[in-house]
Image: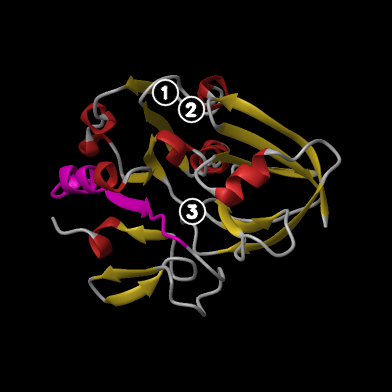
Amino acid sequence: MAKIISNREIAPDTYLMAVQGKYSGKMGQFYMLRSWRFYPLLSRPISIHDINDDSISFLYRVAGEGTVLLSQLKTGDELHLEGPFGNGFPELKGKVAIVGGGIGAAPLYYAAKALGSSSEVENLDIYLGFREEPLRLEAFEALANKVRVQLGGNVTELVNPNSYDYIITCGPEAMMEALYKKSVGSSAKVYVSIERHMACGIGACLVCTCETKSGNKKVCKDGPVFLGEEVYHG
């Protein structure tokens, strides 16, 4: 069991939780979290928002019974974590864009932190779309050459795929698919982080099956990160 350092609401129904301990994980991977014994039955998959020397943090939105219970945790309370799980974003080089929509920005901070410190990345730009107030904008601004924010509307309209070698994205399915289709024929290779309901986190239960061009894949094990061309049609 791990101890909660802090668990604060940073926007309506959106929480930033820090957990004490030494943890590992690649950008785009996730942990399974639970603070209850029997009900709800399943742990909740939540992506890594950040990892430091003595803590790991998760940015999450209250969306059901499990996340309601997580949001009620206080400093000093205990939490059970399992992970890291999943196939994360690859190491990239050249010109990179990060595109996030809403709570999809959660795993992209850790990705921006890793890519921003990489000597292989020549330029890192971040595009974030939100319905209302931005999430952790100042933290993102400290990591990139440029950060552009779209409040309402479609953040993909801000992105020119021909300006990048790679684009990584997480957010609403329609946003990611539109971004991939916009990139077809451009210089950019697109990686998307898919969200699905999960039960085990290790690929045993088949709850999170995702259809791809090479057959059905498990989001928890084969993903959550896939090449855009694997899951969307151009």
**Local secondary structure at mark 2:** loop
Up/down of 53 relative to 25, above or below = above
- Residue 91 shows which numbered tag? 3
Q: Position of residue 124 (x, y in %)?
A: 43, 33
- Residue in the picture at 15% in, 49% down: 184
- Is residue 48 in sight in this rendering? no
- Residue in the picture at 49% in, 41% down: 108
Q: Nearer the viewer, mark 1 or mark 3?
A: 1
The residue stretch that appears in magenta = 177-197
Q: Left or right: where does residue 224 sit relative to residue 164?
A: right
Q: Left or right: where does residue 191 sit relative to residue 81?
A: left
**Local secondary structure at mark 1:** strand
Q: Earlier in the sequence, mark 1 or mark 3?
A: 3
**Residue 217 figure quarter:** bottom left
State the separation of the CA atoms marked 3 and 2: 16 Å
Q: Amino acid at mark 1?
A: Val
- Residue 144 shows which numbered tag? 2
Give the residue at mark 1. Answer: 147
